[in-house]
Image (cartoon, grey):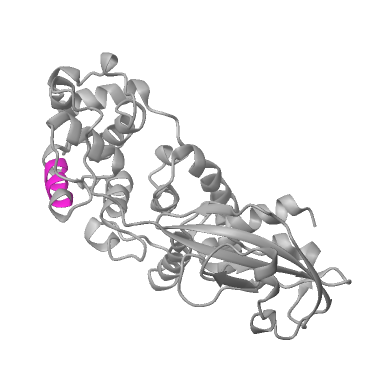
Amino acid sequence: MDFKHKLINWYSEHKRALPWRSTENPYYIWLSEIILQQTQVKQGLPYYMAFVKQYPTVFDLANASEESVLKLWQGLGYYSRARNLHTTAKYIATDLNGIFPNTYKDLINLKGVGDYTASAIASFAFNEVAAVVDGNVYRVLSRFFGINTPINSTSGIKEFKTLASSLIDKKQPATYNQAIMEFGAIQCKPKNPDCNICPLSTGCVALQKNLVDTLPVKLKKTKVTKKYFNFLVCIDHNKQILFEKRSGKGIWQNLYQFPLIESERSLSHDEFHLLDLKTVIPETTTSDYSLYNEQDIVHKLSHQHLNTKFWIIEVDALPETAISIKSLTKYPAPILISDFIDQFGF
């Protein structure tokens, strides 16, 4: 029995019951794939269920405000996915009359859809012979065939895509794609896979050469930079607070935050006292302040670590743009801000 048939047989016995596997509706499949980009199933599943409930059709999602979409996405991270999701929903609903493109060639032109996602939708919804290559597939192929080409290099991406395309079962591409991804997720795991019960063990080069722990190979990530954030939590006597929408490009684009001062290092009380807060909150009259957290709260992103302090500012007056503290949780915010709001207990 060959590689692909062993995978499919294994899948028929071990596959998890996941809602997007019981449909060929391209909207639901697209939604699940966007949510699961850089996200594990156990984390993404509740978000998928929430989106399907609130936006049961692509028209519902298209007609929603970006703010409500970002709010539902809150905590999932990589917020550009949510913005692209909304943009693409509007395009499909308006320009394509709600009809999804049905080929890899057309799907890959959608905003937020790359090679993997286009292949997944094309095969799962339309049974096109399009090989998926995600982190799980990279791991299975690199170990089984003993390939040490870095999976995040240009040559590696091309090599693995070519190999994956040569292996796919042309009679049942959707099942095969699901099988190899599921195999990587729960059998050929990143750490400590149980090779004793693996149906591919007899042909696995990594197992034979003791390379399971070293494959796949990945080029070193970009150096992580440190940033120092000081959020100004300005509260007046009427339980009003400043909460502003981030403008411009960036990972938190169109999310809400407290006024921010970025510094070159973590600030002490004395150093903070020397800051001119009027540059950030010009219309605010400050009366007193205190520091919520003496130790920096470190929020880790892919390429930067945010060392954060929250300064509680008591003010005599706030501008008209201030909002009621009671309405804080209605606005979409980065999880760093959302967690603070929950913990502070306004």
Residue 32 vertical position relative to residue 57 in the rendered view, above or below: above
Comparing 199 with 282, the one in front is 282
Comparing 300 with 94, the one in front is 300
Residue 139 vertical position relative to residue 65 in the rendered view, above or below: above
Check if residue 28 falls in the magenta segment.
no
Q: Quadrant of residue 269?
A: bottom right
Number of callouts: 0
* Quadrant of the rendering where the N terminus is positioned: top left
- The residue most toward the right is 237
Q: Position of residue 278 (x, y in %)?
A: 69, 83
Going 13% across and 32% down the picture, which residue do you hit? 146
Q: Position of residue 276 (x, y in %)?
A: 67, 81
Numbered range of the magenta stretch = 157-164
Residue 255 vertical position relative to residue 319 in the rendered view, above or below: above
Residue 293 is left or right of residue 255, and the answer is right
Going 62% across and 63% down the picture, which residue do you hit? 332
Residue 142 is left or right of residue 313, and the answer is left
Taking the image as drawn, is residue 208 in sight?
Answer: yes
Taking the image as drawn, is residue 177 in sight?
Answer: no
- The residue most toward the top is 196
Q: Position of residue 137 (x, y in %)?
A: 25, 38
* Quadrant of the rendering where the C terminus is positioned: bottom right
Comparing 122 with 222, the one in front is 222
Going 28% across and 66% down the picture, which residue do you hit? 109
Check if residue 161 falls in the magenta segment.
yes
Residue 176 is left or right of residue 58, and the answer is left
- The residue most toward the front is 270
Q: Position of residue 314 (x, y in %)?
A: 81, 70
Residue 94 is left or right of residue 280, and the answer is left
Q: Main secondary structure of the magenta part?
A: helix
Comparing 177 with 301, the one in front is 301
